[in-house]
Image (tube, rainbow, N blue to C red):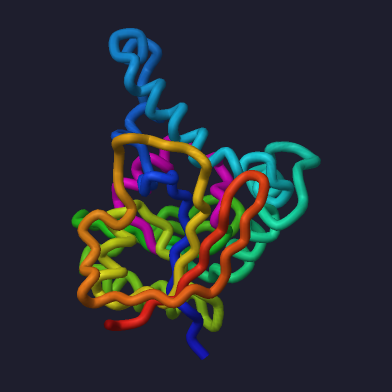
Amino acid sequence: MAGKVFFSVSMSLDGYSAPESMEGIRATPEQREQDPRPDRWVAQWMELQAWIFPQRFFRENLKLGEGGEEGPDNDVVRETFARTGASVMGKRMFELGEHSWPAEPPFHSPVFVLTHQRRDRWERLGGTTFHFVDDGIHRALARAREAAGDRDVRIAGGSETILQYLNAGLVDEFTIALSPVLFGAGTRLFDGVDASRVTLKPVRSEPTARATHLTYTVHPR
C-alpha cells in the first residue's frame, strides 16, 4: 500500500516560512560587513526553527552531541523522520543545503531534486542519495513513491515546491509548526495557493512551550 504525500514546515505567526532571502547562509564575512541584511535573515531563520534545535532526536540525527529535550516537540521530529521513505525538494533548497549540510545529511533516505539540468546522482554518507529529476513534479513524485515503498513521501521544500504539489492536488496531509515569531516580510507559505481547489480538515492541534503543531488533511474542493 502506497504511503501518503505530506509536508512539514515551520511558519511564523504572520504566515512566513522563510525570511526575505536565505543567501545569508552563504554570505562571506566581507559581504556581511557591507550589508547587514544577511545576518538579520539568518537570525530570523534561527528564530523560526528555534523549537527544533534543542530536541534530542534532532541533535542525534545531526550528530550535534548527546542530550536534548524529550517531549511532544521531540515526538514530532522523530515521527516525521520515521514516516519519511523519500523526499522531494526544489533546486533552490538543494543548492542552499549543499553548502550547509554535513557530510552525513539528515535525510538518511533518497531525495529527489527538481531541476532543469541533468546531473548524476550524488551519494552521501548515512544512506542519503540525491537524484536529480528534470522532467517535472509528477515524475519526481512517482520516483519518490517507488523509492519510499509503503512509507510516506515528504515534500521537503521550499515553499514554491510545496505550493506546486499542493495546487496540483498531490498533497494528502501537512503539519505546520507555528513558531511564536513575527517576520513582517519574507516568503509566505501559502502565497499563490489555489484556494478554489483545496479544502482542509483539521486532524490535530498540539500546543507546546515552543510551538503549536497543526496537522490537516487536504481534500479537493
- Relative to 100, say whether 116 is above or below: below
- Relative to 65, say whether 136 is above or below: below
In the rendered image, residue 101, in percent from the top left (x then y), is placed at 50, 41
In the rendered image, residue 90, in percent from the top left (x then y), is placed at 31, 55
Residue drawn at point x = 43 percent, y = 29 percent: 42
Residue 60 or residue 158, whichever sits in front = 158
In the rendered image, residue 201, in percent from the top left (x then y), is placed at 44, 77
Residue drawn at point x = 48 percent, y = 54 percent: 123
Judge from the rendering whether residue 88 lies leftward or rightward of residue 108; answer left or right. left
Residue 192 or residue 157, whichever sits in front = 192
Residue 151 or residue 111, whichever sits in front = 151
Residue drawn at point x = 62 percent, y = 55 percent: 207
Residue 84, picture quadrant: bottom right
In the rendered image, residue 135, in percent from the top left (x then y), is placed at 21, 68
Judge from the rendering whether residue 46 lies leftward or rightward of residue 56; answer left or right. left
Q: In the displayed image of the protein, which residue is found farthest to the bottom? A: 1
The quarter of the rendered structure image containing the C terminus is bottom left
Q: In the displayed image of the protein, which residue is found farthest to the right? A: 67
Residue extent of the magenta highlight = 88-107
- Relative to 220, say whether 28 is above or below: above
Q: Is residue 150 magenta?
A: no
Residue drawn at point x = 44 percent, y = 61 percent: 111
